[in-house]
Image (spheres, rainbow, N blue to C red):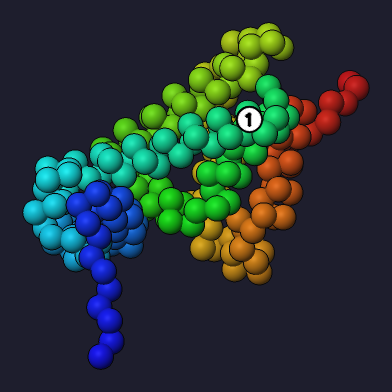
Amino acid sequence: MAATARRPDRGEARAALLTAGLRLFADQGYAATTTRQIAAEAGVSHALLRYHFSSKAGLREAVDEDVLGSFARSFATAREEGAGRGTLAEAGRAAALVFGADRGRRRYLRRVLVDGDERAAQLLGRLVRGAGRELDRLTADTGALPAESRRWAAYQVLFLVLGPLLLEPALEVVLGADPFEPATLADRSAANQHLLQHGLLPPHDD
């Protein structure tokens, strides 16, 4: 007789529900996903979902915090590694840590941003503010960004990071390879850093 899978205990249920919520929200979208589907996917009772998160909205907030928290954790790891400390290389390493290793988080972010509801705007706003704080830190010793660049700087960094994420399914076909494979990600990160530091076109004499 085949052994049945062990159900998560109460201490493990929260993590299992977060994982299930992230996957189902990414696959089906928030509106189409029910709390009973999430509980079944996690292998826990519906009551435990309500115990840990109160509601589907509460679970979504926790998933968002987990995804956004991965950015902060990755920047901290990049700093500890000394990856281009205090430079855009450090930010590039952090982006690689966030997106290179976790397809699930990429899919979740893509779904939220493409769905374009109020929650997407809130999430994007938080990403912009986080990118702005990191840019302030990275440029603290080199002087402030010019005023004409300040407004869009955080958006431009995010555009470089989120563009491949949003286009990942088509980009994989065009490249004929996983666009977040470590070597490809490293090449793209280096190109992004050069673009941000030196501009797209070299200066020329008039």
Residue 95: name its quadrant. Answer: top right
Locate the N terminus and report the quarter of the image it occupies.
bottom left
| Residue 77 or residue 115, whichever sits in front | 77
Q: Is residue 89 visible?
A: no
Residue 201: name its quadrant. Answer: top right
Instruction: Say left or right for 142 vs 151.
Output: right
Q: How many marks?
A: 1
Q: Position of residue 153 (x, y in %)?
A: 57, 24
Instruction: Say left or right for 81 vs 14.
Output: right
Residue pushed farthest bottom? 1
Mark 1 burial class by Cα count in 10 Å: few <14, some 14-19, many 20+:
few
Q: Amino acid at mark 1?
A: Glu
Q: Position of residue 62 (x, y in %)?
A: 28, 41
Q: Position of residue 199 (x, y in %)?
A: 74, 30
Q: Is residue 62 visible?
A: yes
| Residue 88 or residue 119, whichever sits in front | 88
Which residue lies under the disc numbered 1? Answer: 80
Query: Compared with residue 199, is residue 101 higher up or lower down, i.e. above or below?
Result: below
Q: In the image, what residue occupies the spot 23% across and 65% down?
A: 7
Residue 8: name its quadrant. Answer: bottom left
Residue pushed farthest right? 205
Instruction: Say left or right for 61 vs 135.
Output: left
Residue pushed farthest left? 47
Q: Position of residue 167 (x, y in %)?
A: 52, 55
Q: In the image, what residue occupies the spot 22% across and 57% down?
A: 9
Q: In the image, what residue occupies the spot 53% across and 58% down?
A: 168
Query: Compared with residue 93, is residue 13 higher up or lower down, i.e. above or below?
Result: below
Label 1 residue SS: helix
Q: In the image, what residue occupies the spot 13% across and 60% down?
A: 45
| Residue 122 or residue 206, whichever sits in front | 122
Instruction: Say left or right for 60 vs 166.
Output: left
